[in-house]
Image: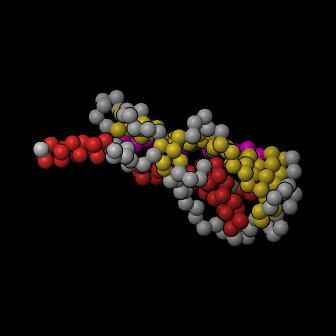
Amino acid sequence: MKKLLLVLMAVILSGCAGTGPNKTNLNPELAEQPAGVYPPGILITVEGKDNRPQQQVVIYTVSNDPPILVNQVAPHVLLAERLADGFSQQGLLRGGQTPVVVTIAVEELLVTVGRTKSGLLYKSVARSRIKLTINNRGSVLTKDYNRQESKETATKPSIADLEKMLNVQLSDVLQRILGDGQIRESIRGGN
């Protein structure tokens, strides 16, 4: 009787076990930016937009795992904050209503985890599409940044591995934006 009760409790408790994390924690790193890139006194506003058709950043296509949602901070808010921090390090001032508005829009940000054609390996495909628009007193510059990476693994990739794929892409996009001479000229405008 005790063994039966023990087995029954184990079955009940295992049914209550969670399915694992259902959120990710994106955290793109931003390298230290050089000071004095911009002349003093330029005010900018950095805005973020989310134009993605879905809110998930990880989707499993081979199992019953739920899609994984972004943790705490929406990607467009996170990118706008990091970009504003980078511009501040370079000498720009943040303000409310400013003549220079930088908009970073997340068009796509997704890792799809499936199986290879042979069915033996897991295949993770990370895609990011980011659109940057600078409006400086009516003069507009738009740039698109597209990244894609694929990895094949024998075991199901961890959430940390999938986050890393997206973080590397987002960090690269931010660095390219902050180091782009055409973007710098557009922000300087008539200054």
Vertical arrangement, residue 125 with respect to residue 158, above or below: above
Q: Nearer the viewer, residue 74 or 11?
A: 11
Give the percent coordinates (x, y) of residue 162.
Answer: 44, 47
Q: Quadrant of the C terminus?
A: bottom right
Residue displayed at 56% across by 42% down: 109
Q: Main secondary structure of the magenta part?
A: strand
Residue displayed at 21% across by 42% down: 8
Residue displayed at 60% across by 49% down: 74
Q: Is residue 131 visible?
A: yes
Residue 145 lies within the magenta run? yes
Q: Can residue 114 be seen in this view?
A: no
Image quadrant assignment for residue 91 = bottom right
Q: Nearer the viewer, residue 106 or 182?
A: 106
Is residue 12 found left or right of 7 in the rendered image?
A: right
Q: In which quarter of the image is the N terminus?
A: top left
Give the percent coordinates (x, y) of residue 88.
Answer: 71, 65
Q: Which of 190 and 60 is in front in this view?
A: 60
Is residue 85 found left or right of 16 in the rendered image?
A: right
Q: Give the range drawn in magenta.
A: 141-154
Give the percent coordinates (x, y) of residue 189.
Answer: 84, 56
Residue displayed at 57% across by 40% down: 55
Image quadrant assignment for residue 187 = bottom right
Is residue 76 found left or right of 139 in the rendered image?
A: left
Image quadrant assignment for residue 30 = bottom right
Residue 42 lies within the magenta run? no
Give the percent coordinates (x, y) of residue 148.
Answer: 51, 41
